[in-house]
Amino acid sequence: MIYRLGDFHFPDAPARLYPDTPGRPWMLEIGFGDGRFWPHYAPTFPETPNYLGVELSGVSLLKAHRRLTEAGLGSGLLTKLPADVLLRKVIPHGALDRIIVNFPDPWPKAGHTEHRLLRAPFFRLAASRLKPGGEVLLTTDHDEYFDFAVQEAHASGVMAVQVGPPPAAALETKYAQKWRDLGLDAHHARFTPTAHAPVPHGDLRPYPEDESTVPHAVLTLPATFAPTDFDKVTVRSPHGTWTVILLDLYGSLRRDGWVTLAHVVEGELTQEVLIGITGREDGTHLVRLAKFGGPIITPGVKAAVGAVTQWLEAQGAVVRHRGY
């Protein structure tokens, strides 16, 4: 099953995500690629564990979903998200039995190490999300990245490292087969928490059922308002916590309405949201976050509604109410 960010709770629980098997071990695979690992790994357990896979590629997401379904593993959950967002916002403290990372992007160029997943902050976050006795499993063909990850695990102060052979299933992945054909060996390490540093969840929340709390504004447009051209608008938080880019303005199916497409970036989290400008019976217009796409209401998304409102003010609109 494929989950969007908006389908999760913050944090979420196995009892809700896997109602038929809530007590089974919960395993997270980061960067599942085309999904070859899990069909080989799941049968090594007496009972199939609860599986959650996270990936950034939409094409890989669809390939993996098809592969897991064909293997009879359709109860596993797949999602297209940055791993940091999923771990930090969705996974509860002490919930996971295992985190699996196979052949992660090594970011080999000089100055790119800050983009690597397996750095000390990741290990501290992972330790907070693992159960006692839980572990992070890394398999990689990249010598320098392997040494880097081991050093970062030690530097985190919360992980012990054990080096050994990889699970056989890790050698069935796309990249493992590629490098094996070239005669290269894979490195494997098992990282186990020695301490659990608390990591806060943050304030993500899904589109609320009480729609009165959805970010919005009410305003009166000038009688001459009829936009034909729209130039991209970029707004940044004074503290650098979010960036909002208003990409385009479209006429809606309603004769007196428009829709704005906004790109919102907050750290590792990126969302594209729609913000409607809809005429009301009393002659005013409602600027409001649309539900389409399952948006998560964050400070950046609220700021996007504010950016649309401010752009309309610059066109001569008068704001009657702000709810963001």
Image: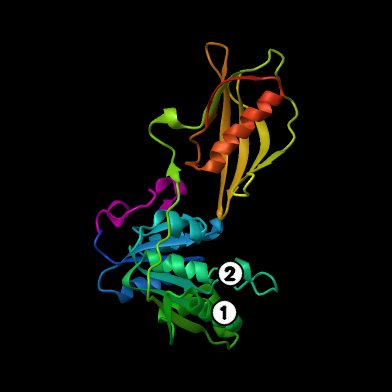
Q: Residue furthest top?
A: 282
Given residues 140 and 123, the one toward you in this image is 123
Q: Which stretch appears magenta? A: 2-21
Given residues 275 and 204, the one toward you in this image is 204
- Residue 44 occupies quadrant: bottom left
Horizontal and vertical percent position of residue 165: 43, 87
Q: CA distance from mark 1 to mark 2?
A: 10 Å
Given residues 8 and 176, the one toward you in this image is 8
- Can see residue 141? no
Horizontal and vertical percent position of residue 160: 41, 80
Residue under circle 1?
148
Vertical order, 294 against 83 (above or below): above
Residue under circle 2?
116
**Tag 1: residue type?**
Phe
Q: What residue is at 42 percent from the left and 76 percent from the top?
A: 159
Vertical order, 111 against 11 (above or below): below
Q: Secondary structure at mark 2?
A: loop
Q: Is residue 6 magenta?
A: yes
* Marker disc for residue 217: none
Relative to 51, is 15 on the left or the right?
left
Mark 1–mark 2 CB contact (< 8 Å)? yes
Given residues 59 and 5, the one toward you in this image is 5
Relative to 24, is 136 on the left or the right?
right
**Tag 2: residue type?**
Arg
Q: How is the image coloured?
A: rainbow
Horizontal and vertical percent position of residue 169: 42, 77
Q: What residue is at 66 percent from the left and 25 percent from the top?
A: 312
Quadrant for the N terminus in the image: bottom left
Q: Is residue 29 magenta?
A: no
Horizontal and vertical percent position of residue 254: 58, 21
